[in-house]
Image (tube, rainbow, N blue to C red):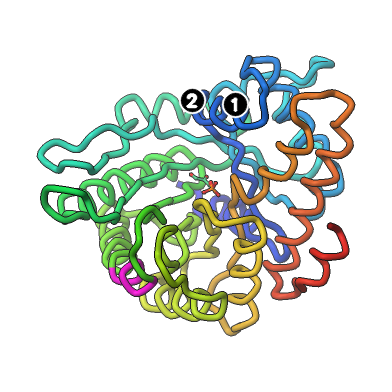
């Protein structure tokens, strides 16, 4: 393992004012997103849409440090034949790849999931490295919504098993010269309050870092992608921006060693502006041992998807929408976002 090289890539992924575009929706997920804007999901429509994002030069070169791709996308060419990976590199951004194979039901744990994809992972990493991937992503999903029947969740089994898989994945990545994004996600589904999210996320992160240690993962050569400490979507009274920021920073300080170069949050179903405001408020707290930035999927793409709606005449409008969100999140990554800037653009 060349730790200096891994560390250089990890630092670049969280460089000041820059963050990650999660464009790694599986074919099933992108179909759902396209269904909502009335666009048929085909290899060409997926290519056209992602190409417009990667050709948003200002956003890509100023705000986006890296792009997480899906297996199909890392192999795809733009309409003019240029590999999409080359478009990303040309814009000064790093290509990355989702390598988990999605979730399956976890035996004897009703309602809980385990992320699969370790078998053959080393060989896939070698191939992806050849295709230009500098970093990878693996997402573990922990649901904490109260089940209608059956035992409460999450179970220790689900937390432990998913943390172990994350650490096995991260070690394999580093051994193959690829920076792992370690993504343990506590879902926002449910009516729980922010304190319940705090308690579960704390346990999850403690166990994830224990497992990373046991698998000999070098913390200097990884990026953590956690959820924020946030109320469930159906909570009656949702925690405000300051509370989310304070609780998330408190939790991360207690759980994430300073050797980790950066933390890039998922948006997890927050609205665009909420995700930006939370990131900004955390960075305003300041005095943090790691960089705090974004690795958003929905919170960066909902606006451009809507503006595009599958029509070539809307490409410029979609690029403007993407650039605006990227700029807002870039400011938030520096603690310099202002809500007025959102109003002016509206
Ligand atoms: P969201 O920001 O839409 O949660 O997606 C980020 C991601 O990569 C989930 O794995």
Q: Position of residue 62 (x, y in %)?
A: 81, 54
Membership of 195 in magenta stretch: yes
- Looking at the image, residue 308 sits to the left or right of residue 203; the answer is right
Q: Residues within 10 Å of mark 2 (few under 14, many from 20)?
A: few
- Looking at the image, residue 105 sits to the left or right of residue 320; the answer is left
Q: Position of residue 25 (x, y in %)?
A: 54, 33
- Looking at the image, residue 265 sits to the left or right of residue 144; the answer is right
Magenta stretch bounds: 194-199
Image quarter where the C terminus lies is bottom right
Identify the residue at horizontal 11%, vertical 48% (top origin): 150
Question: Which secondary structure is most common in the magenta stretch?
Answer: helix
Chain-order first, disc 2 or disc 1: 2
Identify the residue at horizontal 66%, vertical 46% (top origin): 66
- Label for residue 28? 2
Q: Position of residue 278 (x, y in %)?
A: 59, 69
Nearer the observer: mark 2 or 1; the answer is: 1
| Secondary structure beneath label 2 | helix
Is residue 267 positioned above or below 304 on the image?
below
Q: Residues within 10 Å of mark 1 (few under 14, many from 20)?
A: few
**Closer-to-camera residue (236/263):** 236
| Secondary structure beneath label 1 | helix
Which residue is tagged 1? 35
Write down the quadrant of residue 306 in the picture: top right
Identify the residue at horizontal 51%, vertical 31% (top origin): 29
Q: Position of residue 200 (x, y in %)?
A: 29, 65
Identify the residue at horizontal 72%, vertical 50% (top origin): 64
- Looking at the image, residue 172 sits to the left or right of residue 312; the answer is left
Query: Which residue sits furthest front?
Result: 236
């Amino acid at each position: 393992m060349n730790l200096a090289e891994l560390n250089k890539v990890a630092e670049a992924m969280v460089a000041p004012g820059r963050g990650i575009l999660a464009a790694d929706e599986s074919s099933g997920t992108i179909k759902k997103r396209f269904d909502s804007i009335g666009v048929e999901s085909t290899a060409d429509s997926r290519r056209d849409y992602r190409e417009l994002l990667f050709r948003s030069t200002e956003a890509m070169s100023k705000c986006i440090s890296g792009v997480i791709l899906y297996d199909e996308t890392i192999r795809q060419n733009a309409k003019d034949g240029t590999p999409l990976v080359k478009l990303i590199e040309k814009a000064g951004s790093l290509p990355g790849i989702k390598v988990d194979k999605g979730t399956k039901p976890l035996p004897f744990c009703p309602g809980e999931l385990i992320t699969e994809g370790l078998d053959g992972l080393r060989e896939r990493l070698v191939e992806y490295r050849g295709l230009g991937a500098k970093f990878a992503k693996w997402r573990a999903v922990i649901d904490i919504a109260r089940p209608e029947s059956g035992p409460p969740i999450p179970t220790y089994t689900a937390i432990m098993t998913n943390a172990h898989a994350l650490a096995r994945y991260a070690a394999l990545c580093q051994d193959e010269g690829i920076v792992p994004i370690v993504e343990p996600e506590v879902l926002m589904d449910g009516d729980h309050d922010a304190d319940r999210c705090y308690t579960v996320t704390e346990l999850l992160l403690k166990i994830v870092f224990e497992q990373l240690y046991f698998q000999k993962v070098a913390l200097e050569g990884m990026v953590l992608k956690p959820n924020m400490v946030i109320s469930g979507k159906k909570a009656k009274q949702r925690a405000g921006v300051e509370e989310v920021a304070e609780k998330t920073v408190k939790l991360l300080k207690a759980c994430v060693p300073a050797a980790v170069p950066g933390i890039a949050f998922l948006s997890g179903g927050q609205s665009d502006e909420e995700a930006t405001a939370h990131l900004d408020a955390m960075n305003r707290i300041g005095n943090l041992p790691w960089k705090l930035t974004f690795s958003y999927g929905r919170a960066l793409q909902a606006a451009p998807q809507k503006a595009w709606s599958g029509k070539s005449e809307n490409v410029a409008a979609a690029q403007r929408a993407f650039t605006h969100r990227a700029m807002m999140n870039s400011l938030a990554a520096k603690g310099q976002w202002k809500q007025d800037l959102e109003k002016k653009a509206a």
